[in-house]
Image: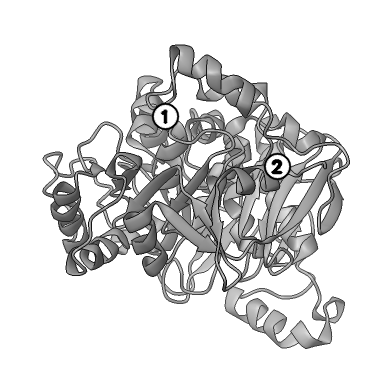
Amino acid sequence: MPQTLFAKIWEAHLVTKRTDGRDIIYIDRHIMHDLHAPIAMQKIVDSGRTVHRPDLTWSSQDHSVSIRLDRDTNAKDGSPLNQKVRVLAKQFGIRVFDIGDAEQGISHVIGPELGMILPGSTYACPDSHACTIGGLGALAFATGTTELEHVLATQTIAFVRPKTMRVNLTGKLKPGVTAKDVILRIISQLGVDGARGYVVEYAGPVAEALEVEGRLTLCNMSIEWGARSGLIAPDEKTLAWIKGRPYAPVGAQWEAGLEGWREFKTDPGATFDREHTIDCAGLDPQITWGTNPGQVIGISDLVPDPSSVDPAKRDAFLHSLDYMGLTAGQPIAGLAVDVVFIGSCNNARMSDLEEVAKIVRGKKLASGVRALIVPGSSAVKRAAEAKGFDKVFTDAGFQWGSSGCSMCAGGEGIVATKGQRVVSTTNRNFENRQGAGVRTHLVGPAMAAAAAITGKITDVRALAEA
């Protein structure tokens, strides 16, 4: 019987079925971070248990670390949470990607980057954006602290089997349109709860044409429209990207793995619980205008009119307009920008910084704009500096930081001030997320760079052509 990619991964990792309707699924790799790891590990200590597979478990220091360039590389820097991770991880024999470690970074960036995540594998992380790694054809589970404790103790997780959805992305992207624009368009068209209860497979010529880092960006925001996880089938591009990474198999193990990995794709004739098709041929760079990732328009569009929405959602729509300081019918392009943030697990990989450098090189920040670039990992930071990008950025007036989550959710107190307008490459534009009363617009990296240079929301394609 033909199977979906999801079904193949789920059934390959099925340990047993519980009487309460949940399945027990084996976890191949497990990366924690500093917000939840201390609590879950302390629960393991308090219960007298131990970590079942410390060799398959890691912890990153990312959410609460300083991004200063001069932060303490002896791993003494950080919050009490960072300190507790060090103590408990050492007790259990878990490797910590700590401040000063060459491989430190945001958990969803370093897992793929280090070759820990393989096609057809399962992955758990106590963070909603665990779904990022679906770009490699792997199945991610975002856990809470209780589920994290269960994974630590048993290397398994209990879940009700989710429904499946396929989103077919047709057409060909125009120059200047990126994976970030595609996922913003999906969410705006299908809704912030359109995938609730589903694992989504992104397919079609647009998904296939994306480079691997673009696929990671697209899958990263699966949670933003309610999905349990997101996947893109692995292909030869995926395998070439993984090969040679530090934790990837080598030699005979690599060769043995290839045949199996190539089987992790949806069979012809396999059925999904729901399917959608989205034509991306006419897609322009996208930007959020409101206070959730589904309130999105193209850069040339006007802020929507409340009369165009479902009456049941009109009050929320009007609230978003008021919070964002916008009027229905006004252009989104041209709005003055106060702060630009380029970073996070969504858009802070080397390919993202390369796009930013193309826009920024030889230019200066607009007067009055504060701009910050934070690489997704220490490896990305080194690679960017090896190409001289740090000098490109700082010469233009950007602040260049060490790796961490930073302003994505106001980490380390890095926030804007009430009423300021922020253009951000992050994945969430919720009220108060980047500071009390702060107005956040989500875009791709090049669009963010264009806003920083011009001091206003700008179609990067016009800037690139100038």
- In the image, residue 312 lies at what x, y percent? 78, 87
Foreground of the two, 266 or 455: 266
Q: Which image quadrant: the N terminus? A: top right
Residue under numbered circle 1: 392
Give the amino acid type for the residue marked by disc 1 in the picture: Val
**Above or below for 277 versus 416:** above
Element under disc 1: helix
- Callout 1 environment at 10 Å: few (<14), some (14 to 19), or many (20+)? many
Seen at 72% across and 35% down, the residue is 265
Quarter occupied by residue 138: top right
Report the front residue among 70 and 463.
70
Q: Is residue 280 visible?
A: no
Q: Quadrant of the C terminus?
A: top right
User: Where does the image place residue 39, in percent across and percent down from the top left?
Assistant: 26, 66
- Residue at position x 67%, y 77% from top? 321
Tell me the residue that label 2 is attached to.
5
Count of numbered circles in the view: 2
Q: Quadrant of residue 21?
A: bottom right
Q: Position of residue 245 (x, y in %)?
A: 43, 23
